[in-house]
Image: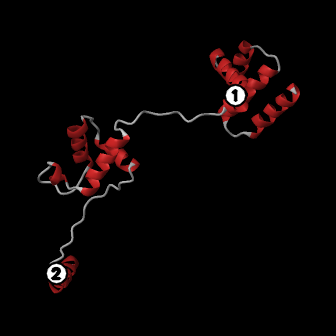
Amino acid sequence: MLRAEIRRLERLSRKTKDVRMKLRYDVVRLHLQRRTKTEISQICAVTYQTVRNYINAYMEYGLEGLAIKKPPGRTKKLTDEQEKQLYDCVSTKLPKDVGFAPFVNWTAILACKWVFMTFGVSFTQRGMRDVFYRMKLSYTRPTYTLKKADPEKQKAFIEDFERLKKN
């Protein structure tokens, strides 16, 4: 059984393309071949603590214990409820409706100010754009159209403009 496990680890080590997983397989394989942890750390060029961690994980959970886990990352500044309130505010209200009088379009800076006034949490402009992205909000600049414009005057203007461009 021990030989079969050593062969299995050798096979997995050769098969994997992930260098970190290869190292983990090799550490455990060397341990099963009765090498000391100090020898393994020298052979694999890792610390004694790393060797011990890999071996302990293997002994406790088997091969699943060697799997590389995604690091948790930084915690969010806003709770899910606060993000929902921000989403509702940005998607249903204008900035002038919540106290930013001259503005009619949301920007990342205005959202930062609103979040700070409402929740007391400060964000950078880039950080707020990341929050928008996570909430599936698109960040675009507004474009304006003149609905009451006269089509004939517009056509005449375009013709005059093209003529002026040629001169």
Looking at the rendered structure, the secondary structure element under dot 1 is helix
Vertical relation: 94 (above or below) 35: below
Quadrant of the image occupied by residue 82: top left
In-image side of 38 versus 116 (left or right)? right
Q: What amino acid type is highlighted by mark number 1?
A: Tyr
Q: Are marks 2 and 1 in contact (CB under 8 Å)?
A: no
In-image side of 119 versus 14 (left or right)? left
Q: Measuring from the top left, give residue 17's x and y in whole percent.
A: 69, 40
Q: Measuring from the top left, give residue 51's x and y in whole percent.
A: 68, 19
Q: What amino acid type is highlighted by mark number 2?
A: Phe
Is disc 2 surrounded by few (<14), some (14 to 19) or many (20+) residues within 10 Å?
few
Could you give the CA–CA distance between mark 2 and mark 1, rounded to whole angstroms?
76 Å
Sequence-wise, the earlier of marks 2 and 1 is 1
Looking at the rendered structure, the secondary structure element under dot 2 is helix
Q: Measuring from the top left, give residue 162's x and y in whole percent.
A: 22, 80
Specify whether residue 45 is in view: no
Q: Nearer the viewer, residue 83 or 131?
A: 83
Quadrant of the image occupied by residue 41: top right
Q: Which colour assignment does the render follow? A: secondary structure
Quadrant of the image occupied by residue 69: top right
Report the residue at 14% width, 49% height from top.
100
In-image side of 4 versus 23 (left or right)? right
Vertical relation: 152 (above or below) 79: below
The label on residue 157 is 2
Report the residue at 78% width, 22% height from top.
30
The label on residue 61 is 1
Q: Nearer the viewer, mark 2 or mark 1?
A: 1
Report the residue at 24% width, 65% height from top.
143
